[in-house]
Amino acid sequence: MIIATAGHVDHGKTLLIKSLTGVDTDRLPEEKKRNLTIDLGFAFLPVDDADTIGFIDVPGHEKFIRNMLCGVAGIDFVLFIVAADDGPMPQTREHLAILDLLDVSQGAVALTKVDRVEETRAVEISEEIDELFSGSSLAGIPVFPVSPITGDGINELKQHLIQVAVGTPPRSSEGNFRLAIDRSFNVPGSGLIVTGTVFSGKLETGDSARVMGAKMDVRVRSIHAQNTKVNFGQAGQRCALNLAGAGLQKDQVRRGDWVIAGRLPPPTRKIDIRLRVAQTESRALAHWTPVHVHLGASETLGRVAILKGGEIDPGGDGLAQLVLDNPIGAINGDRLILRDQSGQRTIGGGKVIDINPPARGRSKPERITFLKAMEQTDDGTALAAVLDASPNGLLLDQFATTRNLTPEDMEILVDLIPMKSIETENGTLGFSPAHWKKIRGTALEGLAAWHKKFPDTVGPAENRIFEITGIRLPLHAAIGICADLAREGVIVKEGMGVRLPSHRPSLQGADATNWKKIKPLLVEGGLRPPVVVDIAKSIGNEPHKVESLLVRAGRQGLVVRIAKNRFYPPETLRRLAEIAETVAAETADGMITAANFRDASEIGRNLAVEVLEFFDKVKFTRRINDGHEILRAATDAFGGE
């Protein structure tokens, strides 16, 4: 269990932790000199052979509130310190507001310095504390009168904390590993050490991990959890990780970064949240208010876009989007705190809903419906609701990473929730049964309308089917849907177009006569069919007339134009695509280059480059540096069995 302190400056937080654990958490020379906690301090209290309580001692001075916010992120329990002589003070109230906004519900109050006051004063302050905490997430927590000076009440408080720790079930280690870094330092002979609170998942010695912000892959050399060397660390623990990596330096790893493992989303600059404005605010929070955002151990500036109504009243809540100056790591369910532009006042808190907002339309009704669906706590309930709110499909990988679901967890959900899954360039796209029925019907209606309007052409490219009926689908989605419908047999891939099985256009008159002359030349040319000029010479016709005929033949799916002067029969182009698949399968990195494709196809470098550029254009491959990555099967891209 992780316990953080909270409370006003000079109310005795550090001295109390020393009385409970024997550890002085003020480690900085400046803290010793000023007798004032400036940064986070750490101590541990063994409970039994298996459990240890980790303490995070936070500063109480208002100037160091940003450090306090870093310390209370991801905790299980708060030990609130209030001095009996002073009673609740300004930072008592602000710390309480912060913990309430973070929805911390487990805690206890240590009423310190009772040796300095009469018993009636201690009782009076206890009642004041009860009243102050009522209405917050910490309402009703017990109050323990203590004096670190005389030792009164210390054992009772310690036993209570131990009892709570023993009775608190370990936090689930499901999900991918996330540790919020709050310290990094070098140890001679060991190297870089990072410490922080583990928000989710489990990590073992020897595992690979990644420092998110620094974009560095690392290996975990050793782990200390709750101040003990262990083989693994997991959610709900304070961990120190000894990291190793090529070129890894201390100045590359800072407070606010994350150590992660598994599939997690990259840092983002736009986050949709459920925002609650602090009850203590004197006026409503307006749209586009500049704020400081604190999440985990990170802090950045940004602005608040209110998604409905233009403002949120004190004590009220609403949907909002944070537009950040710098990207931060976040997932669905993370808690955050907002402070004013100067960083002097806490104005609200929030819970992350989505980290993949669209570029436009953040406040459209359909987007609001999506966010309310994504707010569901249960992953299965959320997935079903989000599918219902996504008429154009849901990228399942994006849903999984946003909610920190492992591939195994997501596979279980997909098996449980009724849906149609479509493979696309960007990942698996999920549709609710109702939305899939509509999309499928729309595709067939769109094709029928196209054939009626353009009876002499084979059919449109995949994305055009949906445009005809007014549905704007991303290209990757349209391609994936059409590939699935082609496998089902309700549409046919013909060249670079698609058609209904019953639609068979053909060339007429002189075009048909000339095509009978041209087709054998293209077939005999094999993987290197003749260019337009050579075809024209062979049949005794003018190049521009041959080109026009080939364009018309292309509309009927008889040829595919890959460059200005080069046309391929679809089956030949498919053979080249299959060669590309073989090349990719035989290379270690799965990449196709102009050189290895040229060698495998024996068509020469210039034509190999032309063909690969065309493959990129039609989304059969994707260019990555000097290579090309296969995106879909050759038969999906160019038809055939």
Image (spheres, grey):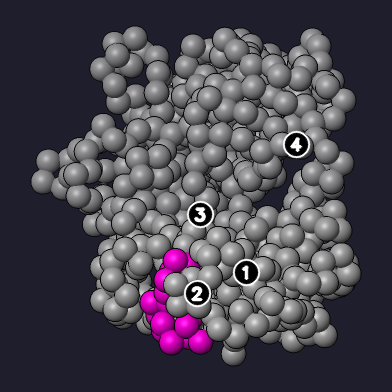
Cβ–Cβ below 8 Å for labels 1 and 4? Answer: no
Between tags 3 and 2, which lies in front?
Answer: 2
Q: Position of residue 264 (x, y in %)?
A: 50, 54
Label 1 to label 4, Cα distance in Å?
Answer: 48 Å
| Picture coordinates of residue 351, whole percent (x, y) | 68, 39
Q: Nearer the viewer, mark 4 or mark 2?
A: 2
Q: Amino acid at mark 4?
A: Arg
**Which quadrant holds residue 305?**
top right
Q: Earlier in the sequence, mark 1 or mark 4?
A: 4
Tell me which numbered mark, 4 or 2, is placed earlier along the sequence. 4
Question: In terms of sequence position, does the residue under pointer 4 or pointer 3 come before the other?
Answer: 3
Q: Of helix, strand and loop, which one carries label 3?
A: loop
Secondary element type, mark 1 = helix
Tag 4 residue: 362
Instruction: Indicate the amino acid at tag 2.
Output: Gly
Which mark, residue 549? Answer: 1
Label 2 sits on residue? 540
The mark closer to the camera, 1 or 2, is 2
Q: Which numbered tag is attached to residue 264?
A: 3
Q: Which is nearer the eye, 455 or 616? A: 455
Q: From the viewer's perspective, is residue 116 above or below residue 322? A: above
Q: Is residue 285 magenta?
A: no
Q: CA distance from mark 4 to mark 2?
A: 60 Å
Callout 1 crowding tier (Cα within 10 Å): few <14, some 14–19, many ≥20: some
The question of residue 522 being in magenta is answered with: yes
Viewer-nearest of discs 3 and 1: 1
| Earlier residue among tags 3 and 1 | 3
Residues marked 4 and 2 touching at CB (< 8 Å): no
In 3D space, how far apart are the residues under numbered discs 3 and 2 (Cα atoms)? Answer: 62 Å
Which residues are drawn in magenta? 520-534
Residue at x-position 82% and y-position 66% = 454
